Amino acid sequence: MDIKKNVSLKNFNTFRIDVRAKYFLQLNNLNQILENSKHIRKEKVLILGGGSNTLLLNDWDGIVLVPNFKGKSIINETQEYIDIKVKSGEIWDKFVRWSVRYDYAGIENLVMIPGTVGGAVSQNISAYGQNISDTLINVDTINLETNEEKSFSPSECGYEYRRSNFKNIWRNKILITSATFRLKKHTKQFELSYHERAGRYGSILEELQSFAKEPYSIKDVMRAIERQRGKRLPDVDKLGTCGSFFENPIVSKKKYLELSKRIPDLQAYPVENLSYKNDFSKEDEYVKIPAGRLLDELGWKGKWEGNVGVYDKHALCVVTNMKATGIEVKEFSDKMREDVKKNFGVDLIPEVNIF
């Protein structure tokens, strides 16, 4: 496929922001990168997976690359686990459902997360106690500046909470072509410990107990996650959204105790990998708190300003009527951040990539 000019990106981002790319190239194979490498190197590059975690503010004065590499293959298998290489253009949710269908465990809690495999690996997605990086064996890539192909181990990818080198120092320079996952076979040990706000959605275990009996199957677990998500996520065919707009903030235990006096039902969760914060010297002195609960306390749930609002079932979910500009979304989200900072002294960090 040749490089296209002046292409609308509305169908390549889930906020449905209608900006345009000066140049656009959908990648179906690596040869397209090699054949167009001179052009790619001359332009400002933006790599878009499913666009499910991206906010575009303006037209892109450069080239947009959309990896569309397809396919998956089993590269190793034992009685206990299976290693599966998945191309980066595969839809993440379809891969999760395929894994569950064949009773391969490790990513079932990550169902219904939009986007591609490449995007999921780049974002280090996590949900309900599972992290994608915990199942990764390696990530295959190509350097857009040198055309060098290289495989990275998870430890080399700089994985931290909702972070990776692909989001930071390698952003738009290193393109993910595939990733290999190690999943458990026929296990009955699932991650069921994650709890949502008490009295609001309940826990995964409570959800399971409402419709299934022990011993729970992997399909039961996935169904429980689907039911939980269905209670608080919008219909993406009706509203533009990237899901959770902000990361859950990490605060000191002292700060958490202070906040819990004002918000008695505020929950706290253990955190890992805090090296990106220089002042976090001891992990056990810090906790992760739900950003949505802080926003809910301030009345943001269901609030709208023009074309942008907050979903009425989830205060962390910024939505649009599909007519908003990226600037409108950014300005609205800035007001949310300022409100939380003013009232609680907590900094909210956008989870979405803003360009």
Image (tube, grey):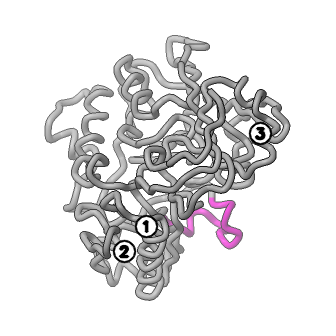
Give the magenta-colored segment's residue range. Answer: 274-288
Where residue 344 appears, as percent x and y from the top left, is 43, 83
Amino acid residing under circle 1: Ile
Q: Are marks 3 and 2 in contact (CB under 8 Å)?
A: no
Residue 35 falls left or right of residue 107: right
- The residue indicated by pointer 3 is 144
Q: Earlier in the sequence, mark 3 or mark 1?
A: 3
Q: Is residue 165 visible?
A: no
Where residue 237 appears, as percent x and y from the top left, is 28, 46
The quarter of the displayed image where residue 221 is located: top left
Q: Residues within 10 Å of mark 1 (few under 14, many from 20)?
A: many
Q: CA distance from mark 3 to mark 2?
A: 41 Å
Q: Residue furthest left?
A: 211
Q: Decide whether residue 292 is among the magenta residues.
A: no
Q: Secondary structure at mark 1?
A: loop
Q: Predominant secondary structure in magenta? A: loop
Q: Are marks 2 and 1 in contact (CB under 8 Å)?
A: yes
Q: Residue furthest front?
A: 5
Amino acid residing under circle 2: Leu
- The residue indicated by pointer 1 is 289
